[in-house]
Amino acid sequence: MLAVSLAVAYVPTLLGLSAAPALARMQPDDRTVVDGLVFGALLFLFADFMSLTANLGVGAADLIWRGALLASFAGGLVVFAGLERLGGAAPARLAVWWAVGVGLHSLAEGIVVGHNLTLGLAQALRPLAVFSFVLHKVVEGLSVAVLMARGQRTGLPLQVMLASVAALPLAAGALLGAVRLAGAASSIFYALGAGSVAFILPAFAASRSRHPAAWTAAGAAGFLFVAVAALLHEL
């Protein structure tokens, strides 16, 4: 489980994070396009998380579960907003909070991966699905890197730490999935992750006023890129 997690989650996330030094050297106006790309990518992931939250292992007619999922989504949003309020809104700290949010999503993904591994490696490690997943993790790492660059905190130790926070929970989730933890539990973590995305999206929208056309075009490109990657996962 750990080897699979390192290969498909940790390494790609760290690769995305490794862009932080280059991003830090860019002028704020030049990072507008990157902000737009990340916003578009995360907007698709938010919609995807909400879909998974609603459909993975949870009966749509079960009002108790639906209430629990709504509470988890709201809880994810409120908790991260509270962390920002208590710890400050400095970009470097925001990068840490967002890495934790990505980690919640990775935990949910890990439960699904662990379950698929019980069906056999051929099912869990289909080449196109793995490629799609790797692209997805690179984008998540890049989104954290953008926040690191704003705070001019881009050292390798911080990259390694945030990659660990964001990606390694997948290994824990895979172990839980391998022992047949209910899909409903994964839905709860997807809901928490969706709340964290709702919290972080405005951070990438703030730069739109500098170059609205460029930011919007980049946002559309980011959305389509992740959407195509998601389609590859289904092939």
Image (cartoon, rainbow, N blue to C red):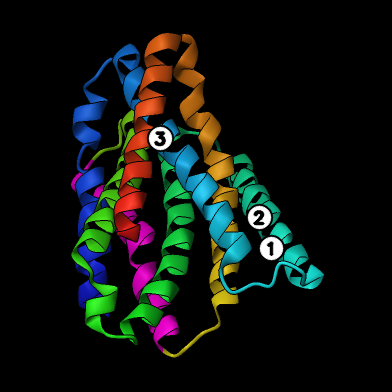
Q: Which sits earlier in the primary sequence, circle 3 or circle 1?
A: 1
Q: Element under label 3?
A: helix
Q: Where is residue 173 in the image (x, y as percent from the top left)?
A: 42, 75
Magenta-colored span = 155-178
* Quadrant (top left/top right/bottom left/bottom right) for the N terminus: bottom left
| Residue 73 numbered mark, or none | 2
Circle 1 residues within 10 Å: few <14, some 14–19, many ≥20:
many
In the image: residue 190, left or right of residue 26: right
**Numbered-mark total:** 3
| Residue 69 numbered mark, or none | 1
In the image: residue 134, left or right of residue 204: left
Q: Is residue 89 above or below residue 161?
A: above
In the image: residue 154, left or right of residue 46: left
Say which residue label 3 marks.
223
- Residue in the image at 46% along x and 29% along y: 204
Circle 3 residues within 10 Å: few <14, some 14–19, many ≥20:
many
Q: Which sits earlier in the primary sequence, circle 3 or circle 2?
A: 2
**In this view of the protein, which residue sits in the foreground, 142 or 214?**
214
- Residue in the image at 55% along x and 49% along y: 196
Circle 2 residues within 10 Å: few <14, some 14–19, many ≥20:
many
User: Residue flagged by tag 1: what amino acid is it?
Assistant: Leu
User: Residue flagged by tag 3: what amino acid is it?
Assistant: Phe
The span from disc 3 to disc 1 (Cα, nearest Å) is 25 Å
The image quadrant of residue 170 is bottom left
**In this view of the protein, which residue sits in the foreground, 105 or 235?**
235
CB-based contact (under 8 Å), mark 2 and mark 1: yes
* Quadrant (top left/top right/bottom left/bottom right) for the C terminus: bottom left
